[in-house]
Image (cartoon, rainbow, N blue to C red):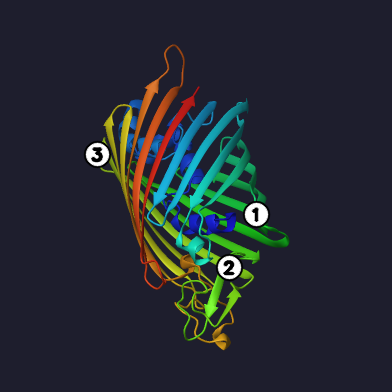
């Protein structure tokens, strides 16, 4: 699985909750007491009263990694381990470390490193006539600079990802602005990526893929208990978007399983250009002092005719003063691209052709639970947070030869030290 395939899966399966920057910026702006008076609509509001109103949402955002309770004025050290296994004989182990350091009162630098160690004997590997499992490692480095002022929050970053047959690097810039009234935030982000696609065992094979991704979100505090966010994302890919390892069989006797039984066999061919649109609407409301509910709907459409719907619901429960339990469910459904076929019978049918199951019609269900426990630091400000998350997925491929269902289990353990 190369970086192109990983990115395609992240695009479809990523957690479709609120985007972090606008949520974080809005909640930080709410620490201003005059803002809180205006939002809640009373003449005097104490910080304790504010904590009562917003505690469920604040705790949820903190647990989800969208808000640091001690805000931007803290140094951080974090480490996490992600493990995934599925019924398609694929295992991923991914350690992650991150450090954040204040350079000034309103400027901080964030550096992170992650590795994916991936071992698979999946149906894609078997369809390519490989009889041995494949093991790969991807290394990723991220560098980010953040600046926070009264109403303006700026960020910029650089990302580098390397693996034996794929290299990717790029930059991103973003800004968030607290609109007058201090109860709404406008957030914009732009990312540009440059990828080089290779093929193991063939040093002469090299293809380029460039990506531009823009996102605009508007976040509004509707009342003391409710937050609403609308997000639009536009992305364009230009270049090589097929897999150099994937071949498609043709002919009346073709099985649809790789080149087995095919009269002829050709490398996968997909368009060089792809434009993607996504629109998401998220709502979060505190039901009581301990409970909050959230829901997100996302619609996706691209010019390959792939369209998808995603619905996610979440329940956050403040079990104790420093403990939070989060329950999540997500449903996803997509129609396949217009050139996908279960079997390609004739060569003249093949303008474009693919056996990528991520481009076929499919649906999935995902359920998960996450628990975070916070510990105060003796003798100094800050906290230590420990998080354990477990989720299960069921994917249904409605029109893919050789694989109807995939079941997956994911476990993440993380520690965060904030000082």
Q: Mark 2 or mark 1, which has the lower sequence index? A: 1
- Measuring from the top left, give residue 390's x and y in whole percent: 35, 42
Tell me the residue that label 1 is attached to: 165
Q: Residue at x 33, y 50 (%)?
A: 392
Nearer to us: label 2 or label 1: 1
Give the spatial CA distance, label 3 vs label 1.
51 Å
Of badges 2 and 3, nearer the viewer stands 2
Farthest front residue in view: 131
Callout 1: SS: loop
Q: Residues within 10 Å of mark 3 (few under 14, many from 20)?
A: some
The answer to whether any part of residue 129 appears in the image is: yes
Outermost residue toward the top in this view = 379
Residue occupying image coordinates x 41% and y 28%: 385
Q: Which residue is mark 2?
A: 275
Q: Nearer the viewer, mark 3 or mark 1?
A: 1
Q: Which residue is mark 3?
A: 288
């Amino acid at each position: 699985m190369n970086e192109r395939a990983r990115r395609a899966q992240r695009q479809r399966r990523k957690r479709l909750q609120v985007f972090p920057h606008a949520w974080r910026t809005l909640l930080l702006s709410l620490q201003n007491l005059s803002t809180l008076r205006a939002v809640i609509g009373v003449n005097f509001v104490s910080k304790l009263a504010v904590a009562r109103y917003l505690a469920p949402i604040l705790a949820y955002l903190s647990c989800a990694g969208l808000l640091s309770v001690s805000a931007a004025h803290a140094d951080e050290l974090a480490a996490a381990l992600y493990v995934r296994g599925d019924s398609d004989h694929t295992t991923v182990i991914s350690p992650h470390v991150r450090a954040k350091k204040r350079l000034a009162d309103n400027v901080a630098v964030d550096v992170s490193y992650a590795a994916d160690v991936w071992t698979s004997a999946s149906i894609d590997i078997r369809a390519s006539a490989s009889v041995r499992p494949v093991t790969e490692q991807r290394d990723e480095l991220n560098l980010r600079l953040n600046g926070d002022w009264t109403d303006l929050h700026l960020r910029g970053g650089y990302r580098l990802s390397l693996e034996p047959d794929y290299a990717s690097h790029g930059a991103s810039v973003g800004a968030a602005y607290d609109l007058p009234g201090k109860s709404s935030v406008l957030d914009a982000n732009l990312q540009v990526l440059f990828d080089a696609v290779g093929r193991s065992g063939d040093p002469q094979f090299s293809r380029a893929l460039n990506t531009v991704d823009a996102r605009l979100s508007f976040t509004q505090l509707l009342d003391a208990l409710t937050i609403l966010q609308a997000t639009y994302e536009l992305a364009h890919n230009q270049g090589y978007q097929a897999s150099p390892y994937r071949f498609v069989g043709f002919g009346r006797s073709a099985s649809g399983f790789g080149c087995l039984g095919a009269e002829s066999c050709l490398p996968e061919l997909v368009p060089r250009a792809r434009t993607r649109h996504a629109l998401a609407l998220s709502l979060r409301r505190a039901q009581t002092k301990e409970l909050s509910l959230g829901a997100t709907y996302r619609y996706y459409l691209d010019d390959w005719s792939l369209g998808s719907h995603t619905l996610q619901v979440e329940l956050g429960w403040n079990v104790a003063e420093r403990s939070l339990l989060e329950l999540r469910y997500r449903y996803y459904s997509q129609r396949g691209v217009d050139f996908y076929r279960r079997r390609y019978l004739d060569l003249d049918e093949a303008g474009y052709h693919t056996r990528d199951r991520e481009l076929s019609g499919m649906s999935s269900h995902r359920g998960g639970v996450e628990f975070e426990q916070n510990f105060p630091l003796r003798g100094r400000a800050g906290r230590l947070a420990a998080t354990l998350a477990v989720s299960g997925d069921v994917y249904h491929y409605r029109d893919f030869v050789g694989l109807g269902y995939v079941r997956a289990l994911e476990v993440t353990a993380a520690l965060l030290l904030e000082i």
